[in-house]
């Protein structure tokens, strides 16, 4: 028999996976940012599961703690930036924002550095993790650069503050295009623009106009518009009506967290940030949980599902399906669950169970 | 570039400080006396669009049947006309009567920006600064969450709804969110007074001050200042995205919630959805001198208009709130009791809460309960 080289390992020909479109030897490198608190342990868990699934991913670990660059401006370390620009795909754990460090939020810095304009959060009900809502299957796509979070505020007179919400044509068109392309690539049937144009006529009106224009080029995807309050009202009564939602920054923030709450919270919600120039960073959106850091109690589900999202983004659908199914099976079985999911297993046990299921699938 | 914007914001901010009287006499208007003749009150009625007219007809029918001493002055507002005469007439009627009951007036958002939302115009002209909504789980309605009892107080005049927008460069639109110290103190004061009056334990301020540091920061600071004057009531704050997440998982933890305009819109709709939908919750808008009552989620309901399937509960409960405001407590309690009996005991529900009753059947049932329990009424 033939001996092949897969990366730097020697494997038997029959063990070689030909199920992917990837030509053999093509392992993709992904920048891994473990983060703080429980970040390192959940990153290790994800790496273990990926190894068990034999995913063609090689990890490059980097640290993104802000440093002061020349000129006094805070920036992310050049090695991290270089690595991201080279690999284009990143996976990030939770980052803490120290209060007195003087530098802005790390997430904000990353967003600005790589122009991460779209935040995508697919929310699917997890069987086995009971919430009052059982039939959620929607995606929120949020414009991430402007809108209400532009940070432009002024004190006009003592006691009167004005905060500016900025909506531009380019950003609105870009996010609308991404939303429709996402819908097309992931076999979603409709895209709904969420707005408040009855009150904010010009700004949300501009956003809506751009969405309508882009919808013209994507006739295979149904386009609807809905007021923010109507969406909120209907979402808590019957979330099955919604498919893909696209919206400006603030509404996106509120709605994506609302949808995360419907499926069980930030501990099980994946999230991806898409940037210009093909950069994409997938992350877990929960906090660093310093009280359980280092105690092997963390739940790696959020980071794992984000990593699965990443695999899908890279076209590795087979591996993505395998890992996702294993994860959902473990949760549905309810035998080995971490504390926040209602069980009392350790993180390593949970991870081991998923790895076992992944390996059994082969 | 910013001077005109600043002036607009300045005028807006100083209006409540200058006071209604100064503002009015400056324009040469006389303030009419409140309308109460011969023991009967007159209330302005604005039918609005969609399901508004039919529901308000039911309210009138019910009031006539129960011999409630309230007369309605009906003012129609045509939502498709571009002139502001209609809405100004309505505002004048409300100034004359002091109290109004209204349906939602539709806003066509494809019209140009100078065509403002009529509802918003009404709220800001009359300075109805507080929107109050009481969400309670009703035992007869099937919902995913039980035992919800939240009072939501929302600042009604400023914030993101200032309608101050401009296109500084083609393709770039700026919309201003104004937060003033006076309005924030005023709404916080209202919230704490109401909490104390109703015996509530805790007030939660909802904000996004980690991102909008100056604007929501000012709001939060004002709330904290007012809270220090009410040591018997606990005060805490929560960021709006966390709030929505908590609301869909554990809504029972909230007591009284206080927030600026836009977050109020989101949170009130989420809460209305949690207790059973837009057809069940009434809302009230209070100003210093006026009060306007309507459904809490302000839906026009175009798709269900004139089909006799709309849920009249929200509008009828709003009319009870109005009767309470007019100090006609006996009538208010009688009608409210009949509505809740129909909802919880008779279980006659309309389609939006999973039943098959029509609007008129529900109203008939309420009238029957009032007749069987109470004083002389007219013929059904």
Image (cartoon, rainbow, N blue to C red):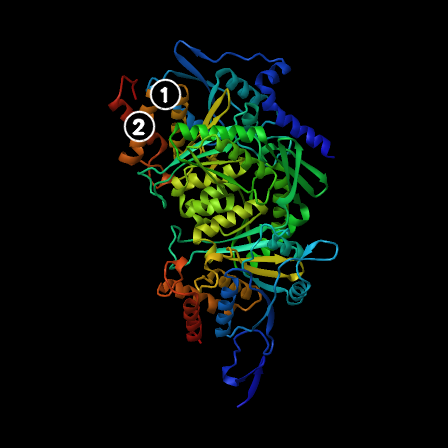
Q: Which residue is drawn at 29% across and 19% down?
A: B379
Mark 2 is surrounded, within 10 Å at the Cα level, by few (under 14), some (14 to 19) or many (20 or more) other residues, namely some
- Kindly state the secondary structure of the residue where label 2 is placed: helix
* Label number found at residue B324: none
Q: Can residue A193 be seen in this view?
A: no
Residue A218 in percent (x, y) is at 60, 54
Chain letter of disc 1 in the image = B
* Label number found at residue B63: 1
Asked whether B45 or B359 is in front, the reply is B45
Farthest-out residue, bottom:
A1
In the rendered view, would you say A126 is above or below A83?
above
Residue B180 in percent (x, y) is at 59, 31
Q: Earlier in the sequence, mark 1 or mark 2?
A: 1
Residue for badge 2: B337
Farthest-out residue, top:
B38
Where does the C terminus of chain A fall, quadrant-wise? bottom left
Residue B298 in percent (x, y) is at 48, 33
Asked whether B120 or A273 is in front, the reply is A273
Q: Quadrant of residue B215?
A: top right
Q: Distance between the residues labelled 1 and 2?
A: 14 Å
The answer to whether A345 appears left or right of A190 in the picture is left
Q: Nearer the viewer, mark 1 or mark 2?
A: 2
The answer to whether B80 appears left or right of B228 in the picture is right
Chain letter of disc 2 in the image = B
Asked whether B129 or B109 is in front, the reply is B129
Residue B94 in percent (x, y) is at 51, 19
């Amino acid at each position: 028999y033939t001996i092949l080289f897969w990366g730097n390992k020697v494997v038997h020909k029959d063990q070689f996976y030909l199920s992917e479109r990837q030509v053999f030897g093509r392992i993709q490198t992904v920048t891994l940012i473990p983060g703080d608190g429980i970040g390192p342990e959940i990153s290790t868990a994800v790496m273990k599961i990926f190894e068990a699934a034999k995913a063609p991913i090689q990890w490059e670990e980097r640290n993104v703690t802000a440093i002061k660059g020349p000129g006094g401006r805070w920036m992310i370390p050049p090695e991290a930036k270089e690595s991201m620009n080279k690999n284009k795909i990143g996976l990030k754990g939770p980052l803490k924002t120290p209060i007195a460090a003087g530098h802005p939020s790390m997430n904000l810095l990353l967003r600005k550095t790589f122009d991460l304009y779209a935040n995508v959060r697919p929310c699917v009900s997890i069987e086995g993790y009971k919430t009052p809502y059982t039939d959620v299957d929607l995606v929120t796509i949020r414009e991430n650069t402007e809108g209400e979070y532009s940070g432009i505020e002024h004190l006009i007179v003592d006691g009167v503050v004005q905060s500016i919400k900025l909506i531009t044509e380019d950003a609105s068109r870009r996010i609308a295009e991404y939303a429709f392309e996402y819908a097309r690539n992931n076999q979603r049937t409709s895209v709904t623009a969420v707005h408040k144009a009855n009150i904010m006529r010009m700004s949300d009106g501009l956003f809506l106009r751009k969405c309508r224009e882009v919808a013209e080029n994507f006739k295979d995807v149904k386009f609807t518009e809905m007021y923010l309050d109507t969406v909120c009202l209907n979402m808590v009564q019957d979330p099955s009506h919604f498919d893909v939602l696209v919206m400006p920054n603030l509404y996106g923030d509120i709605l994506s967290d609302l949808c995360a709450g419907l499926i069980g919270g930030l501990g099980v919600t994946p999230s991806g940030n898409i940037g210009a120039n093909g950069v994409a960073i997938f992350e877990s959106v929960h906090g660093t949980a310093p009280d359980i850091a280092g105690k092997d109690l963390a739940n790696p589900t959020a980071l794992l599902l984000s990593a699965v999202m990443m695999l899908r983004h890279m076209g590795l659908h087979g591996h993505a399906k395998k890992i996702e199914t294993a994860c959902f099976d473990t949760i549905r079985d309810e035998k080995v669950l971490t504390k926040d999911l209602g069980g009392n297993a350790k993180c390593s046990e949970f991870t081991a169970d998923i790895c076992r299921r992944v390996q059994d699938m082969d | 570039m910013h001077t005109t914007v600043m002036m607009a914001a300045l005028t807006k901010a100083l209006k409540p400080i200058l006071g209604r009287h100064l503002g009015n006499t400056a324009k040469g208007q006389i303030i009419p006396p409140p309308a109460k003749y011969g023991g009967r009150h007159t209330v302005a009625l604005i039918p609005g669009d969609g399901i508004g007219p039919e529901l308000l007809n039911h309210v009138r029918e019910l009031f006539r049947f129960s011999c409630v001493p309230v007369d309605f002055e009906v003012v129609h507002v045509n939502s498709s006309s571009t002139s502001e005469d209609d809405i100004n007439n309505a505002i004048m009627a409300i100034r004359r009567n002091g109290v109004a009951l209204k349906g939602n007036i539709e806003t066509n958002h494809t019209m140009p920006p100078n065509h403002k939302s009529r509802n918003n115009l009404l709220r800001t002209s009359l300075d109805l600064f507080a929107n109050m909504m009481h969400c309670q789980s009703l035992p007869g309605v099937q919902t995913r969450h039980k035992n919800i009892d939240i009072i939501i107080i929302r600042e009604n005049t400023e914030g993101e709804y200032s309608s101050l927008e401009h296109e500084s460069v083609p393709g770039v639109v700026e919309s201003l969110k104004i937060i003033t110290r006076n309005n924030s103190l005023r709404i916080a004061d209202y919230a704490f007074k109401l909490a104390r009056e109703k015996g509530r334990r805790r007030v939660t301020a909802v904000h996004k001050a980690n991102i909008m540091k100056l604007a929501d920061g000012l709001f939060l600071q004002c709330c904290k200042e007012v809270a220090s004057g009410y040591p018997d009531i606990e005060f805490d704050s929560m960021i709006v995205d966390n709030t929505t997440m908590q609301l869909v998982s554990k809504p029972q933890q909230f007591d009284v919630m206080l927030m600026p305009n836009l977050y109020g819109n989101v949170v009130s709709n989420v809460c209305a959805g949690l207790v059973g939908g837009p057809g069940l919750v009434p809302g009230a808008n209070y100003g210093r001198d006026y009060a306007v009552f309507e459904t809490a989620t302000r839906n026009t309901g175009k798709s269900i208009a004139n089909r006799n399937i709309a849920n009249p509960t929200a509008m009828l409960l709003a009319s009870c709130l109005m009767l309470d405001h007019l100090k006609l407590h006996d009538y208010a309690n009688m009608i409210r009791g009949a509505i809740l009996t129909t909802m919880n005991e008779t279980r006659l529900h309309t389609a939006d809460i999973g039943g098959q009753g029509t609007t008129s059947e529900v109203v008939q049932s309420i009238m029957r309960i009032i007749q069987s329990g109470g004083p002389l009424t007219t013929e059904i």
